[in-house]
Image (cartoon, helix red, strand yellow):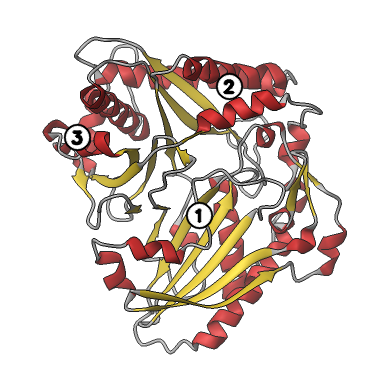
């Protein structure tokens, strides 16, 4: 497949009044997040019988994007001294491309190294905060008329919830509907509730980043768990201490278990394992925050398993996962009472201390089950055929081992996108006990994966 770039430009908010806005302050949470890009890909097939004018369609997409930036103006700026976002006239890198081939055929192929060409920038790697855009866009038009809208968003100030809300606004403007934010005064409520620290020791931030990004080759695979497998895992995860495990906790505990088991086989020894889970604050605070609130309004529940026992019980891991979330819930009162520094140090110090010991498996689990909804990202051509994340292999400053959970879009199944080092992944994808519940997704291939 051939991808040919047809245009590159910087798209800015359509209203110049945006440029006069005061700098957008980072929150305490944003300050602690190293800058890197996460990709989101929305694939749209050409509706049957439609006669979309490509030139007009591309012009409308770009115009509606500029309108959406009026609402989400921080996404057009640049980060300043890990304190705020300004220079909204800098704009967003915006790329248009033509792809030779049919969208459906491209997705179905097993050898898809070319898929990297659909991305506007390299994701999952450390980037310079002060010069990097908050967002980059690439619009890919296939010969068949299908379209892939791809955005890479900086996790420095954007979490998955914010990205999803932005896409909904953009799509609404493109449909000719009202994409304006219902309560724009709440856009920066995160930084008002959790104001930034005037000074954070640079060595502390450097330590966090050094453990966040680790050099080395990694491999990504997709696995699908149908509703029967999920029900079975929920049953096995039950215990007297935890009677009603959710599907995300049961599945997260199951994946954590096998990540540990295959790591033991790969390394020949047992190592402590730490699982971190992102917990969205928006619905957990006394003041319910809207989805469009910009910033990293999430905290991390940390679970640790440090046992050399051969058998790792799923119900025990599920309890540890639930316990970590409960601890986060208990800490929210401290967070809302203003003791934010203590909260953040309690969040990160254990991770730094554990990682400093060496020989520790660090795994990040993120659930997008209740966040990204393709049904709301209709640009006027219907719902996206596929929604996902593209993870290409990278050797330098690659993001550490990760698990991302998302809906399959069909039935009640869940898709797990797992990234491990190549040797460990090879063992996992050939483990018969693991495959009794997990089915390799079609289109999985060495070194890269598409959700």
Q: Secondary structure at mark 3?
A: helix
Within 10 angstroms of label 2, few (less than 14), some, or many (20 or more) residues? some
Residue 218 image-quadrant placement: top left
In front: label 2 or label 3: 3
Where does residue 121 sit, x and y in percent of width and height?
A: 53, 58
Q: Which residue is mark 3?
A: 427
* Image vertical order of residue 402 relative to residue 153, above or below: above
Q: Secondary structure at mark 1?
A: loop
Kindly report the distance in space between the C-alpha atoms of the residues bearing marks 1 and 3: 28 Å
Where does residue 54 sit, x and y in percent of width and height?
A: 50, 86
Front residue of 253/219: it is: 219
Which of disc 2 and disc 1 is earlier in sequence?
1
* Image vertical order of residue 236 relative to residue 417, above or below: above
Where does residue 325 sit, x and y in percent of width and height?
A: 48, 23
- The numbered dot on residue 122 is 1
Which of disc 3 and disc 1 is earlier in sequence?
1
User: Does any portion of residue 147 appear in the rendered image?
Assistant: yes
Please give the name of the residue rendered at 34% of the width and 26% of the height, measured from the top-left corner. Answer: 245
Please give the name of the residue rendered at 69% of the width and 34% of the height, measured from the top-left corner. Answer: 31
Which of disc 3 and disc 2 is earlier in sequence?
2
Q: Which residue is mark 2?
A: 348
Please give the name of the residue rendered at 63% of the width and 29% of the height, measured from the top-left corner. Answer: 206
């Amino acid at each position: 497949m051939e991808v040919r770039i047809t245009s590159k430009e910087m798209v800015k908010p359509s209203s110049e009044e945006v440029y006069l806005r005061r700098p957008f302050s980072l929150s305490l949470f944003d300050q602690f997040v190293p800058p890197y890009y996460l990709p989101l890909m929305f694939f749209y097939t050409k509706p049957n019988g439609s006669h979309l004018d490509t030139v007009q369609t591309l012009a409308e997409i770009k115009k509606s994007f500029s309108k959406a930036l009026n609402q989400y103006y921080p996404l057009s700026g640049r980060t300043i001294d890990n304190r705020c976002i300004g220079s909204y006239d800098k704009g967003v890198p915006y790329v248009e491309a033509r792809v030779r081939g049919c969208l459906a055929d491209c997705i179905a192929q097993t050898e898809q190294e070319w898929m990297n060409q659909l991305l506007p920038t390299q994701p999952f790697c450390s980037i310079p905060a002060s010069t990097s855009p908050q967002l980059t866009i690439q619009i890919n038009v296939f010969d068949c008329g299908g379209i892939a809208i791809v955005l890479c968003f900086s996790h420095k100030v954007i979490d998955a919830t914010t990205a999803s809300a932005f896409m909904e606004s953009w799509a609404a403007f493109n449909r000719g509907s009202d994409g304006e934010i219902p309560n724009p005064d709440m856009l920066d409520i995160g930084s008002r509730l959790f104001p930034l620290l005037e000074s954070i020791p640079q060595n502390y931030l450097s330590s966090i980043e050094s453990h966040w990004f680790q050099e080395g080759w990694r491999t990504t695979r997709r696995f699908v768990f149908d509703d029967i497998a999920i029900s079975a895992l929920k049953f096995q995860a039950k215990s007297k201490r935890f009677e009603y495990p959710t599907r995300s906790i049961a599945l997260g505990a199951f994946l954590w278990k096998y990540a540990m088991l295959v790591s033991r086989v790969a390394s020949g020894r047992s190592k402590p394992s730490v699982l971190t889970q992102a917990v969205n604050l928006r619905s957990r605070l006394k003041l319910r925050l809207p989805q469009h609130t910009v910033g990293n309004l999430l905290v991390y529940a940390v679970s640790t398993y440090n046992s050399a026992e051969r058998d790792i019980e799923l119900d025990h891991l599920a309890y540890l996962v639930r316990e970590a979330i409960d601890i986060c819930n208990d800490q929210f009162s401290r967070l809302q009472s203003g003791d934010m520094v203590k909260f953040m140090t309690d969040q990160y110090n254990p991770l730094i201390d554990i990682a400093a010991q060496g020989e520790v498996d660090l795994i990040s689990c993120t659930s997008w089950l209740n966040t990204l909804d393709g049904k709301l990202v209709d640009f006027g051509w219907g719902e996206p055929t596929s929604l996902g994340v593209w993870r290409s292999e990278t050797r330098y400053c690659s993001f550490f081992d990760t698990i991302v959970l998302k809906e399959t879009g069909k039935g009640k199944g869940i898709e797990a996108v797992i990234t491990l080092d190549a040797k460990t992944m090879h063992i996992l994808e050939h483990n018969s006990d693991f495959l009794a519940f997990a089915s390799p997704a079609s289109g999985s291939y060495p070194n890269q994966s598409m959700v």
